[in-house]
Image (tube, helix red, strand yellow):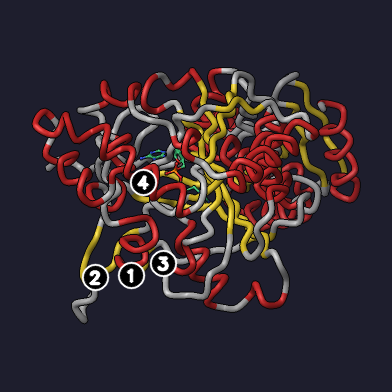
Amino acid sequence: MAGIAAPRGTHDILPAEAPAWRWLLDTHSRVVESYGYRPIATPVFEATELFARGVGAETDVVEKQMFTFEDRGGRSLALRPEGTAGVVRAVVGAHLEQERRPVRVHYQGPMFRAERPQAGRQHQFTHLGVECIGERSPHLDAEIVEMAWRFFQALGLEGVQLQVNTLGDAEDRRRYREALVAYYAPFRERLCDDCRRRLEVNPLRLLDCKKDADLVPGAPLIWELLDAGSKAHFTAVLASLEAAEVPAAVNHRIVRGLDYYADTVFELWHESLHGAQNALGGGGRYDGLAELLGFATTPGVGYALGAERILIAAEQQQLTPQDAGDCDIVVCSVEGPQAERAAEIARLLRGDARVVLDVSDRRLDRKLRQSDKLGARLAVIVGEEEERAEEATVRDLAAHTQQRVPTSQLADAVRHALDAQR
Ligand code: HAM
């Protein structure tokens, strides 16, 4: 019988990959916490309605990509396809924005979308996200974009392109929807079934269609329909970004695939991923979202970055840290009776280093070979003779040298030997 495989579109993070993940997550936390963002964690599943109302029932994400299921009481739940709706539910639901405005939070965790898996596109993937909830200001839009940019700078990742746009306010988008309908209506007969429906219910989503993508370049741009207030907001965002020396290119074709956006939207692209998967992340302002979820109107702005895609790009540029191995030291007993003594020594040394205890009945040469595989730099050997003399043998696994050390001086000798190797 074949062993059970991991589900399609999922990826195990095995120990050798852990240092790269830790580097990525820690760098993100460090950068955003330097702007006053604090961690938040919300459930990986939510009421399906949260996403249908928040993200939009006609978006591809909700309509085609969501993993939904019923709980035992018949309620419809969904594995979260994104984090913003849940974070807004949590923050506004707990009235945090009444204590401090804005509420600055960041999160990292798994998201789920049933898209056809390929490099950089999985069923389960990881978001690094931030949300700034409770205040509307172009400076906050710029802060969010700047943080994403500083994060990529902190990683040292080259070749990231930042594209920004504005989707205006509700009235601008109403005019835009009309303009889109007027543009697409003459093509109605050749549109795919989805787009014919989108023409009626959500014309903005016509711009996401892969099948009718050839019509997008000729479609009207929202910029041409914005009122003065929306233009002023966007101009202020661009001025803030320029002052912060964040190189943002204006791209009026960025519309994002989620319905909750208004005003500023942005994406970060990288060529290493090719074609449709080239977005490392995206975000924008979503002042209408809280209301869609049944709360009082509460402005917000944020982003989410795709951790797996960033790691692909970082690995290509050899930025990810080397695997530091399992441990620094292996303490081996040579025969059974020395096991307790070896365990005691291992305990003593753990204050300063990562120590693996090997009291197995394998031969010493095998134990030393295994120590190399674990990445250890020293082996501390406790045999019968050493125990009798209250000593241990400290072996440098790279230099193949060794010395006998009294147990009372062992901690110092080991520290010294590890320092000498660094
Ligand atoms: P999003 O653009 O849908 O935005 O997702 C953000 C990023 O997640 C994408 O740019 C991509 O890097 C990554 N991503 C998306 N789908 C997959 C997948 N199937 N496999 C691997 N990576 C993927 C949002 O989700 C918004 N919540 C962002 C936001 C936060 N807006 C405001 N606040």
Q: Tag 1: Cα neighbours inside 10 Å, few (<14), some, or many (≥20)? A: some
* Disc 4 from disc 2: Cα separation: 20 Å
The disc placed on residue 124 is 4
Viewer-nearest of discs 4 and 2: 2
Viewer-nearest of discs 2 and 3: 3
Q: Do the residues labelled 4 and 3 touch (CB within 8 Å)?
A: no
Image location of residue 397, percent across then percent down? 70, 25
Residue most extreme to the left = 189
* Disc 4 from disc 1: Cα separation: 18 Å
* Disc 2 from disc 3: Cα separation: 18 Å
Query: Which residue in the protein does label 1 denote?
Result: 47
The residue lying toward the viewer, choosing from 135 and 381, is: 135
Q: Are marks 1 and 2 in contact (CB under 8 Å)?
A: yes
Of callouts 4 and 3, the N-terminal one = 4
Amino acid carrying mark 2 in the image:
Ser
Badge 3 residue CB within 8 Å of ligand 1: no
Of callouts 4 and 2, the N-terminal one = 2
Q: Which residue is drawn at 48% across and 75% down?
A: 295
Query: Which residue in the protein does label 3 denote?
Result: 292
The disc placed on residue 76 is 2
Image location of residue 131, percent across then percent down? 59, 56
